[in-house]
Amino acid sequence: VQLQASGGGLVQAGGSLRLTCTASGVMSSSYDMGWYRQAPGKQRELVARASSDGSTDYADSVKGRFTISRDNVKNTVYLLMTKMKPDDTAVYYCNFRRIVFDYWGQGTQVTVSS
């Protein structure tokens, strides 16, 4: 199983980015899909999750600004980030999880300038 994340980059505060993560070697419909991030000197934290039952949840810090979505046919999860802030600067990782299976993407850098 491989997860390939893309879409990171440099954006000004208030701007938007969309992250994409596509999995190969897995049927994603039964997996929970999520995005995590890790800023320098901080622990990795959950940003958003799209569960296999269709529900979503978000970190309080991104509610109302970020939207997670999934396409089970394409084995892909997206994270649309809007109204971005410098505090959103981090390496973002995608995650597919089901029971004991836990797969991670390679990480994509997101930098928000003030």
Image: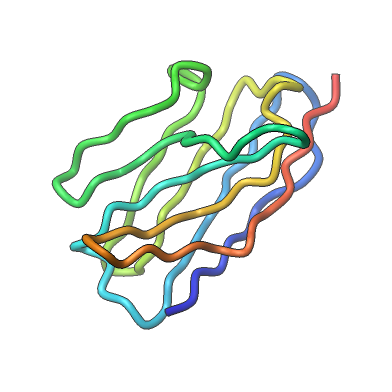
- Return the x and y of residue 33 as percentages of the image width and height: 35, 52
Query: Quarter of the image containing the N terminus?
Result: bottom left
* Snapshot colouring: rainbow
- Return the x and y of residue 28 as percentages of the image width and height: 28, 66
Q: Residue at x 67, y 28 (%)?
A: 88
Query: Quarter of the image containing the C terminus?
Result: top right
Between 75 and 106, which is closer to the camera in this rendering? 106
Q: Picture quarter containing residue 11?
A: top right
Q: Residue at x 53, y 35 (%)?
A: 45
Q: Residue at x 50, y 60 (%)?
A: 21
Question: Please, is residue 64 above or below residue 23 in the view?
Answer: above
User: In the rendered view, does 31 fall on the left or right side of 87?
Assistant: left
Between 37 and 19, which is closer to the camera in this rendering? 37
Q: Residue at x 14, y 46 (%)?
A: 53
The residue lying furthest to the right in this view is 114
Q: Picture quarter containing residue 44?
A: top right
- Return the x and y of residue 96 as percentages of the image width and height: 37, 59
- Return the x and y of residue 65 as percentages of the image width and height: 51, 21
Task: Report the label total.
Answer: 0
The residue lying furthest to the left in this view is 53
Question: Please, is residue 105 above or below residue 69 in the view?
Answer: below
User: In the rendered view, does 15 fall on the left or right side of 57?
Assistant: right
User: In the rendered view, does 63 fall on the left or right side of 100?
Assistant: right
